[in-house]
Image: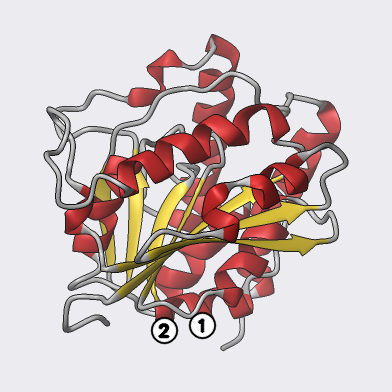
Amino acid sequence: MTTTPPASLTVVLPAFNEEDRLGSALDELFGYLRRRGGPAREGSVGADALPPTVRVLVVDDGSTDGTVALVRARPEFSSPPAGVRLDLLEVSHGGKGAAVRSGMLAADSDVVVFADADMATPPDQLPKLVAALADHDVALGSRIQPDGRDMRRTQPGYRRLLGRVFHAGASIWVVGPVKDTQCGFKGFTLAATQDLFKHQKVTSIVFDVELIHLARRRGYRIAIVPIQWSDKRGSRMSARPALALRVAWDLFRIPLLHRRG
């Protein structure tokens, strides 16, 4: 557990065929990071609240479009500004869970955060996770606000319905009281990162549930951090029968995968 302010942060962004969305997301992220020492936007948290060294690691999950070329063409990739750098990790296509695992295990900073490549959670929410990791091992971004408002209300109706069904199963079998398991914005200390992702076995979209199950089982201190979020169109996830079966199977087998140790 972190006992002193972290000196470094890695932000892992998994990407699969994100040529159309990743450029604007990186513009937003690095624009925020460049405002270090400057005034924060109204209602946001200033980038100077982050550690002095920030690494942005894009994990390309075997894209077949121009995602890799887009990252390599960024000025932050070839000429990184002081205290910030952009790196690229190319892996074979294995799904989001596998890409996140590869990126998290490649990080060596004091704290590590993974986020969705579309910046559905704006970068000014990063300091909230970093602050929570001062006295917790794991910080889970939550789209449910303290007053009960749920940022997921902007999602299409079918996505909200599927989410409620999914959570009903996950809460009983795997994750207990965690109300928002699928928020793609989670932070970890380096020690928790190396332990949890080393033991991660699920590579489908249910990998978040496995991480929460592992963190609770292994006794890590978990913070639930309400964050701002907006639904970004362009997701390729669709409610196909094959996906529903994979999700149900993975939910069922998570406790069985970790019944020892």
Spot occupied by residue 31 in the image (x, y as percentages of width and height): 36, 39
Q: Are marks 2 and 1 in contact (CB under 8 Å)?
A: yes
The residue pinned by badge 2 equals 191
Looking at the rendered structure, the secondary structure element under dot 1 is helix
Spot occupied by residue 138 in the image (x, y as percentages of width and height): 35, 67
Q: Residue furthest front?
A: 79
Q: Is residue 123 visible?
A: yes
Residue sitting at 41 percent across and 79 percent down?
A: 190
Q: Locate residue 83 relative to residue 131 in the image: left or right.
A: right
Query: For the residue marked with disc 2, what is the amino acid?
Result: Ala
Query: For the residue marked with disc 1, what is the amino acid?
Result: Asp
Residue sitting at 26 percent across and 60 percent down?
A: 223
Q: Quadrant of residue 58?
A: bottom right
Tag on residue 195?
A: 1
Looking at the rendered structure, the secondary structure element under dot 2 is helix
Q: Locate residue 214 relative to residue 1 in the image: left or right.
A: right
Q: Locate residue 12 relative to residue 147 in the image: left or right.
A: right
Question: 175 above or below 199?
Answer: above
Q: Locate residue 89 relative to residue 260 in the image: left or right.
A: right
Nearer the observer, 70 or 99: 70
Question: 25 above or below 176?
Answer: above
